[in-house]
Image: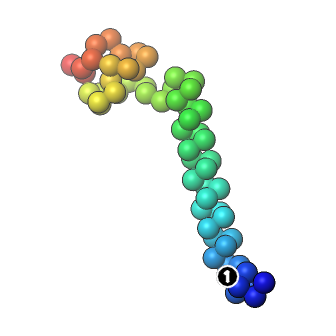
Amino acid sequence: MSWIQANVGNIVIVAALAAAVFAIVRGMVKRKRSGASCTGCAGCSGCSSCPGAKSGRAE
């Protein structure tokens, strides 16, 4: 119990960082599922998989 009391600050910071990472990843997954993750790329490696891409390369 004394270890938790001695490290409560670190525990709170790690929990906040974990929550932030979780929220960011969750948002990325939601955008990917809705098809909004790629919006008019200019020659990226995934350009051919973009919903609005006309060809595999930007011209």
- Residue 24 image offset from top left, x and y in percent: 57, 47
| Screen quadrant of the N terminus | bottom right
- Residue 42 x, y percent position in the rendering: 29, 27
Q: Residue at x 60, y 41 (%)?
A: 26
Q: Position of residue 46 (x, y in %)?
A: 34, 27
Q: Is residue 7 left or right of residue 33?
A: right
- The residue most toward the left is 59
Q: Residues within 10 Å of mark 1 (few under 14, many from 20)?
A: few
Q: Nearer the viewer, residue 5 or 56?
A: 5
Name which quarter of the figure residue 50 lies in. Answer: top left
Residue bearing mark 1: 7
What percent of the width, then of the height, locates residue 21?
A: 57, 53
Residue at the front extreme of this rendering: 1
Nearest the eye: 4 or 12:
4
Answer above or below: position of 33 versus 7: above
In the structure shown, which secondary structural element does the residue marked by tag 1 occupy?
loop
Considering depth in this image, is 58 or 45 the residue closer to the camera?
A: 45
- Residue placed furthest toward the right: 1
For badge 1, the amino acid type reads Asn
Which quadrant is home to the C terminus?
A: top left
